[in-house]
Image (cartoon, rainbow, N blue to C red):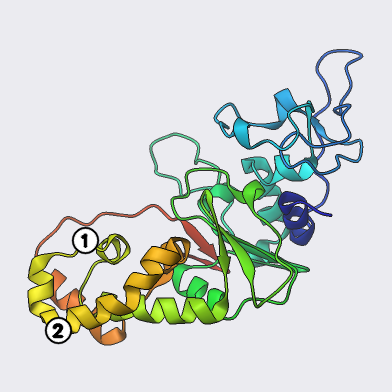
């Protein structure tokens, strides 16, 4: 059975990602182990020696599936490296995917993009990097299986190798950073509707997840109305906290609430802050 990284790299259809030629004369280009140190899948005799495969910043050694191996498969190396991302993005320029962050004009070379900065959904012959609103659609109406869902909430760690390929639309896995969540579309819809009712009433996403609300907002909403909304979300907070994390990431405000929030924000003068892109969509970057 394919591991998450091997499934993802096959779906990306970006070709081989071989190890570089060895600098030492007589040294082998490929690792000698049949199983991948990281994902546990087959290396097919063309895996990378572990010391060359992973960046020095990689620190999830406790998550390796085969500690007895000294070889990392090409798929794991490709889907955890900037080089692998650039190879993929370059092969399909029509998708408009970034290979590097924008040049800051400071004389330094632009930093290369990487898989960890984006969310991903992979399927046979299919790959997208969902924005937050798109995640809401996917979780309610997932693609045809098999598929792999990777939700990068913080965009700071390699998590693709942690994922699990799903074989059903009725019950499927989402890897949200280091947390793997089992999702049922019907339950997600019920939970996100309860979440968004509170969100559109003016409560912050963090307070909805924690259950610790600002007393001023409760007073503004009305105690009876707040209690009604809280009673709808509290069972999810208790019994399915992972689903709450997904809702936190993708819950949306109504257009009316967005307009009201923008009006209030316009009254306060604040410096313009240029956010770093975190999500890639076909043809453009999406921040939210």
Left or right placement of residue 71 versus residue 162 in this view: right
Mark 2 or mark 1: which comes first in sequence? 1
Residue 93, image x and y in percent? 67, 61
Residue drawn at (58%, 26%) of the image:
56
Q: Residues within 10 Å of mark 2 (few under 14, many from 20)?
A: few
Identify the image quadrant of residue 12.
bottom right
Name the one closer to the observer, 108 or 123. Answer: 123
Element type at mark 2: helix
The residue beneath circle 1 is: 212
Instruction: State whether residue 95 is above or below residue 63.
Output: below
Residue 186, image x and y in percent? 54, 82
Residue 33, image x and y in percent? 87, 29
Instruction: State whether residue 223 is above or below residue 55.
Output: below
Instruction: State whether residue 205 is above or below residue 157.
Output: below
Name the one closer to the observer, 195 or 28. Answer: 195
Left or right placement of residue 169 versus residue 197 in this view: right
Element type at mark 1: loop
Q: Which mark is residue 202?
A: none
Residue 29, image x and y in percent? 86, 26
- Give the alpha-carbon distance from disc 2 to disc 1, as whole Å: 17 Å
Residue drawn at (12%, 73%) of the image:
218
Instruction: State whether residue 233 is above or below residue 240.
Output: below
The reply to whether residue 288 is in sight is no
The residue beneath circle 2 is: 224
Residue that lies at the very extreme toward the top in this rendered image: 25
């Amino acid at each position: 059975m394919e591991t998450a990284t091997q499934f993802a790299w096959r779906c990306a259809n970006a070709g081989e990602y071989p190890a570089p030629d060895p600098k030492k004369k007589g040294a082998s280009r490929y690792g000698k182990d049949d199983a991948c140190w990281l994902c546990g899948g087959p290396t097919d005799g063309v895996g990378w020696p572990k010391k060359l495969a992973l960046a020095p910043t990689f620190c999830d050694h406790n998550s390796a599936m085969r500690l007895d191996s000294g070889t990392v498969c090409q798929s794991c190396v490709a889907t955890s490296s900037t080089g692998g991302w650039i190879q993929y993005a370059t092969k399909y320029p029509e998708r408009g995917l970034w290979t590097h962050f924008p040049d800051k004009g400071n004389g330094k070379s632009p930093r290369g993009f990487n898989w960890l900065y984006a969310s991903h959904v992979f399927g046979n012959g299919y790959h997208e990097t969902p924005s937050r609103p798109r995640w809401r659609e996917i979780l309610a109406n997932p693609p045809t299986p098999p598929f792999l869902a990777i939700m990068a909430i913080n965009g700071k760690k390699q998590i693709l190798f942690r994922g699990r390929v799903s074989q059903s639309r009725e019950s499927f896995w989402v890897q949200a950073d280091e947390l793997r969540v089992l999702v049922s579309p019907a339950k997600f819809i019920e939970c996100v509707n309860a979440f968004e009712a509170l969100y559109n009433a003016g409560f912050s996403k963090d307070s909805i997840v924690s259950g610790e609300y600002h007393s001023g907002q409760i007073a503004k909403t009305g105690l009876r109305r707040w209690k009604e909304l809280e009673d709808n979300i509290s069972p999810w907070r208790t019994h399915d906290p992972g689903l709450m994390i997904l809702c936190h990431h993708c819950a949306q405000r109504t257009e009316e609430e967005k307009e009201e929030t923008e009006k209030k924000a316009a009254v306060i003068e604040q410096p313009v802050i240029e956010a770093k892109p975190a999500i890639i969509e076909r043809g453009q970057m999406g921040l939210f």
